[in-house]
Amino acid sequence: MSAFTEFVLIAIALYLWESTLWLPLRGIALRRKWRGKGWKAVDPATYMAGKELGLVPLLPFPPDFGIAPCQAPPISPDEGDGFLLERTNGNLLILKSLEWNDLSEKDHFLVAGGSSTRMTSPRYVDLLRRAKQRGASPRGAVTLAWRLALSPTRAGREWRRWMKVSGPFRISGPLLATGFFGGLPLTYIYLGIIPMLIVVAWLWLLMIWTAARLWWLGRRAYPAARTALRMDAFLCLFVPFHAMRAFEIASVHAMGTTHPVALILSSGDSDNPWLAKFVRRILHPLPGSPGEVGFSAAFKPMLARALAHQKKSLADYDLPSDRSDDPESTCYCPRCHAR
């Protein structure tokens, strides 16, 4: 195997690694369908997952401009005076009380009451911090974060804003991929080393421009994620595959405080299969799980308000399924089989 072939294979392997998002299992990535305004939900646990993180594959050619890695707030109020912490793997932990001193952030983790959960973006912590500065209690701040996350109006605004500020990445990503995988080898084969070095210099300038845009996003568009975006900008200066996927990498911050339900409803996709399944899980929590029962009781009113945005109600997703074509069917689970 020649050195050039080895270089190409290593480059492809690194590119494929950058063409993935590793998200907490409690998150959901939405991908815009090619036709219409619908969304397809991608569960991080579907393809490859560990105990806490799962892999979301991206489209092979950048950018995957329809991807929206959404994240629900990790802390929610229960029906009483306590709180529920959703761990990174999706399990719920009951917290009897929560004070401001019990909350902290460390290495992409939110620590609450001695337990931690992974976050995709520090923007959620910034929401709590700003609420605290206004004099809100921990319960008031947590409730406000949920109302914002479930607002279809805000979700639509966040998505439109992201589409606007990420526009340059939709140009730089394809140019970098085409130049690196097509322009470099063809220039070297047909024109020689000097023209190839000129192409390398041009690609590096494009990487610098991408890094500058990420730096700007951290300073102006998403200041709460400034540190993370600046680190990505630094990597873009030296890793071309990272620069190719700048759109997808920054999207975790753009949509990091938006619940997938809100984004789905903001586009009018009220018949989305994932949405129907999610609503049924809220309406019919597992009876043996105190965490799910408490979360369901506290979450129903907020979910009902979000559905009202599309003139829908919780009952619209709790209809018995049509089993007329299945004469052997003897049981029915409203959590799993409603329509």
Image: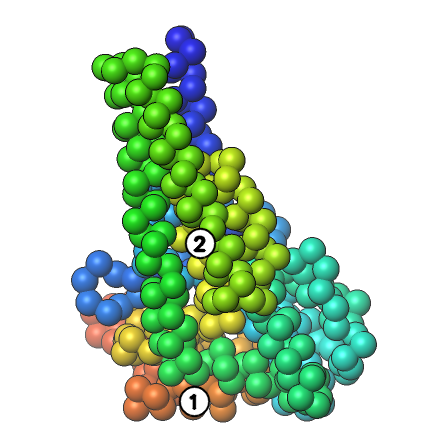
Question: Is residue 59 placed above or below 306 in the rendered structure?
Answer: above
Question: Is residue 102 placed above or below 228 in the rendered structure?
Answer: below
Give how far across and how far down residue 144 sits, in percent: 57, 85
**N-term-proximal mark, 1 vs 2:** 2
| Residue at 69 percent of width and 55 percent of height | 107
Would residue 187 be found to the left or right of residue 96 on screen? left
Pointer 1 residue: 304
Q: Nearer the viewer, mark 1 or mark 2?
A: 2
Give how far across and how far down residue 94 sits, in percent: 71, 76
Quadrant occupied by the C terminus: bottom left
**Pointer 2: residues within 10 angstroms few (<14), some, or many (20+)?**
many
Q: Amino acid at mark 2?
A: Arg
User: Could you say which quadrant of the image residue 179 lies in?
Assistant: top left
Q: Amino acid at mark 1?
A: Ala
Pointer 2 residue: 213
Dot 2 falls on a residue whose secondary structure is: helix
**Pointer 1: residues within 10 angstroms few (<14), some, or many (20+)?**
some
**Is residue 68 or residue 316 the one in the foreground?**
68
Taking the image as drawn, is residue 146 in sight?
yes
Taking the image as drawn, is residue 17 in sight?
no
Dot 1 falls on a residue whose secondary structure is: helix
| Residue at 61 percent of width and 51 percent of height | 51
Give how far across and how far down residue 277 sits, in percent: 39, 72
| Residue at 48 percent of width and 54 percent of height | 214
**Is residue 289 or residue 198 the one in the foreground?**
198
Question: Is residue 19 placed above or below 316 in the rendered structure?
Answer: above
| Residue at 48 percent of width and 67 percent of height | 221
Question: Is residue 228 placed above or below 70 in the rendered structure?
Answer: above
Would residue 152 be found to the left or right of residue 219 on screen? left
Q: CA distance from mark 1 to mark 2?
A: 39 Å
Give how far across and how far down residue 166 sits, in percent: 37, 59
